Image (cartoon, rainbow, N blue to C red):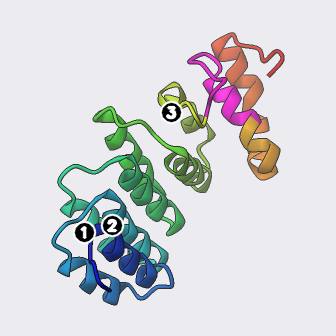
Amino acid sequence: MPERNVVSWTAMVAGYANPGEVSTAREIFDEMLEKNAVSWTAVIVGYGKCGDVRGTRQVFDEICVPDATSWAAMIACYAQNGFSSEAIEMYWKMRSINEKANEVAVMGVISACTQLGDPFFLLLDFSSCHPFFFPFCNEERGFWCLYYKVTIFWSPLESFLYVYLEEWERAHDFRVTGV
């Protein structure tokens, strides 16, 4: 390769990490002189795909200032590997520093909530989510927009939440109209 830069190095890291060759990806990553958010996330995703949650967290903790993508990758890793409580805790840590949740983070925390059987946790601060993901939602309707969008594609969540909807509406004096 005539010119080695952060893009070419990151492509190599991702190329090894994606199929699960994390040790080789990590060796290449450790040789990198310049690292960016994409290269860090590539290693996090690689460890997560292999189920190495401890390795994933170790890499995440090495990042000086994680961005939304790094946070989301860590949340998804926890959720995909059955560490639901940790995924939710990571989500709240991310929100506590005012980092906006992206699509991956939101889907990861939804997955964690459903694994725990906690539909009320889905009443998160979805108004803080990235506007691309919830363009027509506002603070009052955030949950309902999420419910509507997710259940179109994910009917098990719909049946799981259906039991709680009437009680939630009554408790919050809220009715869905024209969602």
- Which amino acid type is marked by label 3? Cys
Q: Mark 3 points at which residue?
A: 129
Q: How crowded is mark 2: few (under 14 residues within 10 Å), some or many (20 or more)?
A: many
Q: Which residue is drawn at 77% across and 36% down?
A: 163
> Residue 172, how many percent across, how many down?
64, 14
Q: Which residue is drawn at 48% across and 59% down?
A: 76
Q: 49 or 65, which is in the foreground?
A: 65
Q: Which quarter of the picture shows residue 173? A: top right
101 drawn magenta: no
Apparent side of residue 146 relative to residue 90 in the rendered image (left or right): right
- Which amino acid type is marked by label 1? Gln
Q: 55 or 119, which is in the foreground?
A: 55
Going from the N terminus, do you reach mark 3 or mark 1 first?
Answer: 1
> Residue 73, how many percent across, how many down?
43, 59
User: Vertical placement of 41 versus 91: above or below?
Assistant: below
Going from the N terminus, do you reach mark 3 or mark 2 first?
Answer: 2
| SS for dot 1 | helix
Q: Name the residue under label 1.
A: 58
Apparent side of residue 79 relative to residue 40 in the rendered image (left or right): right
Q: 109 or 13, which is in the foreground?
A: 13
Q: Residue at x 59, y 56 (%)?
A: 115
Closer mark to the observer between disc 2 and disc 1: 2
The part of the chain drawn in magenta is 134-148
> Residue 49, how many percent across, how many down?
48, 75
Q: How far apart are marks 3 and 1 (CA)?
A: 26 Å
145 drawn magenta: yes
Q: How far apart are marks 2 and 1 (CA)?
A: 15 Å
Apparent side of residue 38 relative to residue 167 in the rendered image (left or right): left
Q: From the image, which quarter does the N terminus lie in?
A: bottom left
The mark found on residue 39 in the picture is 2
